[in-house]
Image: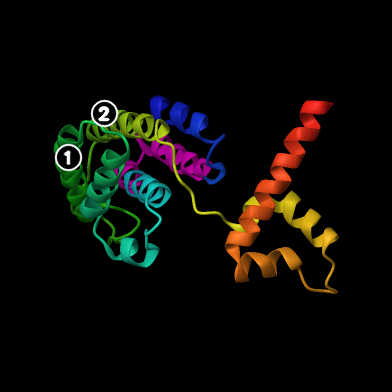
Amino acid sequence: MKHTKEILQVLESRYTNIDYYQTIIQKIEENVESHPDICIESCKALLEGLSKFIWKQIDLSYDALVADKMDFHPVVRQAMTKLADFNEDIELDFVNKVNKLIVSIGEVRNKRGDISHGKLSPKEYFSDSQFSQLVMNITDNMLYYVLHSFSKVSVIKELEYEDSTEFNEWLDNENPIGNLSYSKALFDQDKVAYEQELENYLDAKETVSENV
């Protein structure tokens, strides 16, 4: 999974929680020879997880409860469609065709998977390591292409209170109200005013830096 690992490392500077998917990649690589069906199942999990991640980053209306109830194929297709809206260079038709191949991988996973659909031992069906290698390579190349396309997107992210810890502390110190947090109260009750205060704070900070 060399290509996917590399592009994830690039994206970590912008999305701190994306490094979680490196754990799944490790599981894929560890099991490709010894436990092919676990490898295949992990490939499916990686595709589905990163599709949800991309969808959430580029669509402010993303609803985790809705996404979690969707099947594997619709989740991937929805994420790719949303991504194509932001990056017209993505070959959506090609991705969708590859996605049909991924559907067959999902079917194999349902039939032979060792984890999410617990099997009696001995299992009736097994995959061999040549097939798991194929699935891993397809997954690696497709995700590299998709994540590379995603890396070119300038995401308009909804402001979160936790994004501005330093500013929140400064605002609380400037406006003490006992044991309560002025910054949190302002964020919850008047986000427009909070954003304006944040913009003023960042402008002032930038001006000080330029004058040093």
Q: Is residue 212 above or below residue 135?
A: above
Residue at the disc numbered 2: 89
Callout 1: few (<14), some (14-19), or many (20+) C-alpha neighbours within 10 Å?
some
Residue 66: image quadrant is: bottom left
Taking the image as shown, residue 172 lies to the left or right of residue 64, namely: right
Q: Nearer the viewer, residue 62 or 189?
A: 189
Name which of mark 1 and mark 2 comes first in the sequence. 2
Residue at the disc numbered 1: 96
Q: Amino acid at mark 2?
A: Asp
Q: Can you tell which mark lies on residue 169?
A: none
Residue 29: image quadrant is: top left
Callout 2: few (<14), some (14-19), or many (20+) C-alpha neighbours within 10 Å?
few
Taking the image as shown, residue 113 lies to the left or right of residue 64, namely: left
Residue 155 at x, y = what percent? 44, 42
Magenta region:
18-45
Q: Amino acid at mark 1?
A: Asn
Q: CA distance from mark 1 to mark 2?
A: 14 Å
Residue at the image point whose x is 33% and y is 59% from the top:
116
Q: Is residue 22 above or below residue 144?
A: below
Q: Principal SS element in the magenta part?
A: helix
Residue at the image point whose x is 58% and y is 56% from the top:
160
How many discs mark residues in the rendered view?
Answer: 2
**Res 93 seen here:** yes
